[in-house]
């Protein structure tokens, strides 16, 4: 189940911000006077230390005609603030980049609220119309026992949600929560981008992501959420807490091993839609950006490893990718 939670990181973060931070003033977009390499004062070469494969969340992208290296970083949606860590080295790499590239260009754009909200709701009918009575009742029971959402509240406010809309609301209401104060690497990188006046770019749109998750059937989502809520109640440590601890090791191989050992019913069925096809779609976008600019690319860590991961796909295109120390 950790796989689904990790790969939905940026989309869930986007939705959470749009739903629960709509009263905040949207940050003014900043542009740079030039996207050429910075002046001699800041054009110093950043010295990096290379590590063995899988020993970092940060990878340098070089070769294949690139004038300057770009960097690829694997993120997590939310992590306990006590496990959140960065470094001067990581910040320096972001500072010396021209672009911050994320799955979605600007995850704080409140102008997307109407599009997102409409995209989370069914065109017609309610949740119970699409599943068996036994599954619906089991889901409602798990919901009432493990979140603050009652059956009455669900049927009044959320019964017309699409499958991923349900996931978003429940995850934002405590189902799958880390149990304490959290921080976000995506928001950290966004703050750095604003501070250092980086341009922003996205590998896909929020609409693209919504289209991916629209492929999940209501039956599959209710089975998944019922299992997640039930297992969380019977465990001293939920999946997101476990994943947070492993992510804090800053080793991509440890994260990959943990995810591969998991029993994620949605990932088993929808891996091609969730990961493989999106990774493939991102490669030409990454190539075009890195040919012209120095980029810091931050995407969900689950997208990086494996035969169909972004690291392997970029290497197949002729680029050299090396693990780089974050500290």
Image (cartoon, grey):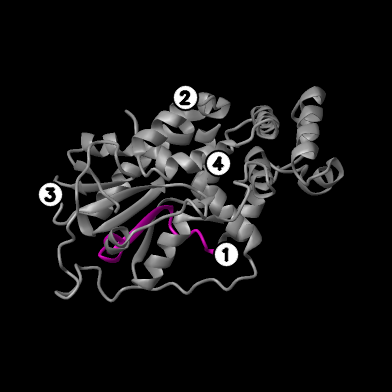
Left or right relative to 72: residue 6: right
Q: Residue at x 50, y 72 (%)?
A: 27
Q: Earlier in the sequence, mark 4 or mark 3?
A: 3
Circle 4 residues within 10 Å: few <14, some 14–19, many ≥20:
some
Left or right relative to 299: residue 294: left
- State the quadrant of the N terminus: top right
In the depicted view, which residue is nearer to us: 180 or 194? Answer: 180
Residue 191: give x, y in percent of width and height.
43, 66
- State the quadrant of the C terminus: bottom left
- Report the span colored magenta: 93-111
- What whole-number distance in Å separates the C-alpha atoms at marks 1 and 3? 38 Å
In the depicted view, which residue is nearer to us: 19 or 44? Answer: 44
Q: Is residue 212 visible?
A: no
Q: Earlier in the sequence, mark 4 or mark 2?
A: 4
Q: Secondary structure at mark 1?
A: helix
Q: Secondary structure at mark 2?
A: helix
Task: Note whether 189 is above or below 136 in the view shown.
Answer: below
Q: Residue 55: which quarter of the image?
A: top left
Residue 117: give x, y in percent of width and height.
65, 53
Residue pointed to by mark 3: 65
Residue pointed to by mark 2: 261
- What whole-number distance in Å separates the C-alpha atoms at marks 1 and 2? 37 Å
- What whole-number distance in Å separates the C-alpha atoms at marks 3 and 2? 38 Å
Circle 1 residues within 10 Å: few <14, some 14–19, many ≥20:
many
Q: Residue at x 57, y 60 (%)?
A: 112
Residue pointed to by mark 1: 110
- What whole-number distance in Å separates the C-alpha atoms at marks 4 and 2? 16 Å
Q: Residue at x 44, y 72 (%)?
A: 29
Q: Earlier in the sequence, mark 3 or mark 2?
A: 3
């Amino acid at each position: 189940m950790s796989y689904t939670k990790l790969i939905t990181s940026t989309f869930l973060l986007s939705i959470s911000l749009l739903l629960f931070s709509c009263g905040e003033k949207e940050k003014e977009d900043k542009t740079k006077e030039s996207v050429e390499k910075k002046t001699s004062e800041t054009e110093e070469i950043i010295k990096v230390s290379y590590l063995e494969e899988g020993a970092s969340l940060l990878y340098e992208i070089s070769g294949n005609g690139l004038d300057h290296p770009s960097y690829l970083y694997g993120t997590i949606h939310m992590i306990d603030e006590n496990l959140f860590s960065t470094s001067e080295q990581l910040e320096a790499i972001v500072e010396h980049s021209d672009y911050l590239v994320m799955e979605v260009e600007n995850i704080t754009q409140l102008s997307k609220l109407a599009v997102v909200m409409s995209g989370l709701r069914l065109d017609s009918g309610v949740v119970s119309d699409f599943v068996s009575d036994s599954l619906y009742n089991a889901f409602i029971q798990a919901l009432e026992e493990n979140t603050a959402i009652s059956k009455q509240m669900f049927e009044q406010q959320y019964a017309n949600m699409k499958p991923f809309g349900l996931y978003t609301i429940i995850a934002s209401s405590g189902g799958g929560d880390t149990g304490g104060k959290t921080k976000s690497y995506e928001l950290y990188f966004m703050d750095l981008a604003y501070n250092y006046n980086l341009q922003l770019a996205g590998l896909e749109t929020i609409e693209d992501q919504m289209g991916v998750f629209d492929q999940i059937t209501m039956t599959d989502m209710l089975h998944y959420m019922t299992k997640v809520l039930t297992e969380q109640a019977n465990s001293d440590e939920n999946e997101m807490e476990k994943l947070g601890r492993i992510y804090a090791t800053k080793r991509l191989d440890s994260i990959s091993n943990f995810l591969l050992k998991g029993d994620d019913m949605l990932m088993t069925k929808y891996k091609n839609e969730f990961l493989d096809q999106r990774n493939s779609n991102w490669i030409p976008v990454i190539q075009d950006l890195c040919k012209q600019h120095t980029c810091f690319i931050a995407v969900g860590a689950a997208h990086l490893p494996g035969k169909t991961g972004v690291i392997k796909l970029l290497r197949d295109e002729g680029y050299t990718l090396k693990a780089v120390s974050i500290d």
